[in-house]
Amino acid sequence: MSLVNLTITLPQLSETEQLLRHIPNGAGKAMMRALNRTIVGVRENSVRSVRDMYTVRGGEFRSLLKINKATLTRLAALITVRGHALGDERFQLNPSKRTGRKVLNGVYVRVRKDSAGGAVKGTFLGVGKFSKATLLFRRLTNDRLPIEHIHGPSIASMVKMAFYNPGSSIEDDAKARLVRELSHEIEYQLLKKAGAR
């Protein structure tokens, strides 16, 4: 199983502890809350970057990006990606629905937005054995059977490609968001101590 871990460490640890030294657990709470808010934004930026590169919808894989939030005892937040492959029917197809007629050259499949895609010979849309969903299949021989379900790239590989893309700013946005959230939490803790909140 392939995993991608995005870990955010705290850049202003000593400064935060110095500012909130009079509040019990103030620094720990501020850092924990800042990390948890930042990691949710990192997940959304990751989903947006994948959708910008691939023809898949965000709802297809957002739930598979698992967030492990920070706690007071463990000040680190991470995203874990389960790495199973999506079926090609989750990407852009033509025809996109089952028709009663035979598709002569195969079903046209486009996985990435920067490529033209192409027809995959011997493919057809059918209903799965255990689910009633429409799936993309390919005949392995000229006979009616055997057939196989066609898969595209795994979710982990799509997230890695989006994360390490030269035009991607996921990591830079995460660092900037963490600084912003941490300053907001410090201000909140100080105002709460002063009785303004």
Image (tube, rainbow, N blue to C red):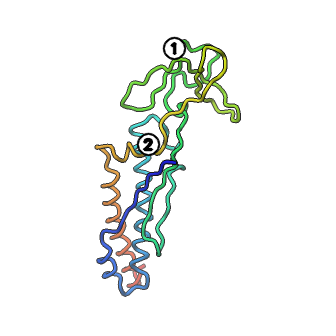
Amino acid tagged 2: Ser
193, 117: nearer the viewer: 117
Q: Position of residue 98 (x, y in %)?
A: 62, 22
Lower sequence index among marks 1 and 2: 1
* Residue behind mark 1: 105
Nearest to the eye among marks 1 and 2: give it: 2
Q: Residue furthest toward the right?
A: 130
Amino acid tagged 1: Asn
Location of residue 101 (image quadrant): top right
97, 89: nearer the viewer: 89
Name the mark on residue 196: none
> Seen in the image, is 149 located left or right of residue 154?
right
Q: State the SS at label 1.
A: loop
* Residue behind mark 2: 157
In the image, residue 25 sits, relative to residue 2, either above or below, namely below
**x 53%, y 31%: residue:** 88
**x 59%, y 21%: residue:** 140
**x 40%, y 81%: residue:** 196
In the image, residue 110 sits, relative to residue 18, either above or below, namely above
Tell me the crowding category of disc 2: few under 14, some 14 to 19, or many 20 or more residues within 10 angstroms, Cα based: some
144, 17: nearer the viewer: 144
Kindly check if marks 1 and 2 are in contact, taking CB atoms under 8 A apart as contact. no
Q: State the SS at label 2.
A: helix
> Seen in the image, is 50 located left or right of residue 179?
right
Location of residue 30 (image quadrant): bottom left
Q: Position of residue 11 (x, y in %)?
A: 30, 68
Location of residue 129 (image quadrant): top right
For the C terminus, the quadrant is bottom left
**x 67%, y 28%: residue:** 127
Q: Residue furthest toward the bottom?
A: 22
Tell me the crowding category of disc 1: few under 14, some 14 to 19, or many 20 or more residues within 10 angstroms, Cα based: few
Q: Position of residue 175 (x, y in %)?
A: 32, 60
